[in-house]
Image (cartoon, grey):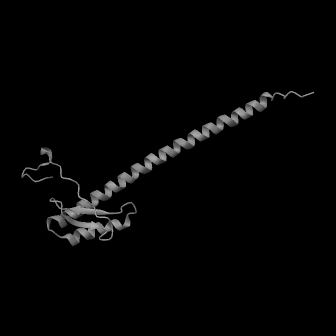
Amino acid sequence: MMNAPRPKSIAARLSWMNVLVSGIALSLAYVSFLAYNLVTSRQAAIDNLTSEAQIIGANSVSAILFNLPASAQTTLSALSNSNDVAAAAIFTQSGQLFAEYPGTGSTPIQPLPLLQSSKNQGQSGTQI
């Protein structure tokens, strides 16, 4: 004669239900922490690179105004301390390369196309 499987006790069923619910809750918490970490680390990287670009831009103004490419190159060389920057370049308004980081041996950076809208024109007609 075959023995029928014995039903589990209520205490055992409740224990397994607690384990299952706790596992699901921990999994959801892990996924939410992971998603939050990805979003905040991406935003932190964007903020960091934006700050570095603003600093390099502010420190390069005099080199551009006085046509000193060596000074601009020195300013760009400060990016060697940043692990997130592979290459950078400064272009003149006409699109000519003024200074670049790293200096040689990498793929050349192409200038962005100039905006032609009227709101980008200064009072003297120069592009801002």
Q: Taking 30 as reference, is 70 above or below it?
A: below
Residue occupying image coordinates x 27% and y 57%: 54
Image position, residue 69 (x, y; %): 20, 70
- Residue farthest toward the front in the current orientation of the protein: 1
Asked which quadrant contains residue 104, the reply is bottom left
Image position, residue 119 (x, y; %): 14, 44
Q: Nearer the viewer, residue 45 or 109?
A: 109
Residue 89 in the figure: left or right of residue 64: right
Residue 2 in the figure: left or right of residue 44: right
How many discs mark residues in the rendered view?
Answer: 0
Image position, residue 92 (x, y; %): 17, 61
Image position, residue 18 (x, y; %): 69, 34
Asked which quadrant contains residue 48, the reply is bottom left
Q: Quadrant of the N terminus?
A: top right
Residue occupying image coordinates x 37% and y 66%: 81
Residue 47 in the figure: left or right of residue 94: right
Residue occupying image coordinates x 46% and y 48%: 38
- Residue farthest toward the left in the current orientation of the protein: 124
Q: Taking 82 as reference, is 34 above or below it?
A: above
Residue occupying image coordinates x 86% and y 27%: 4
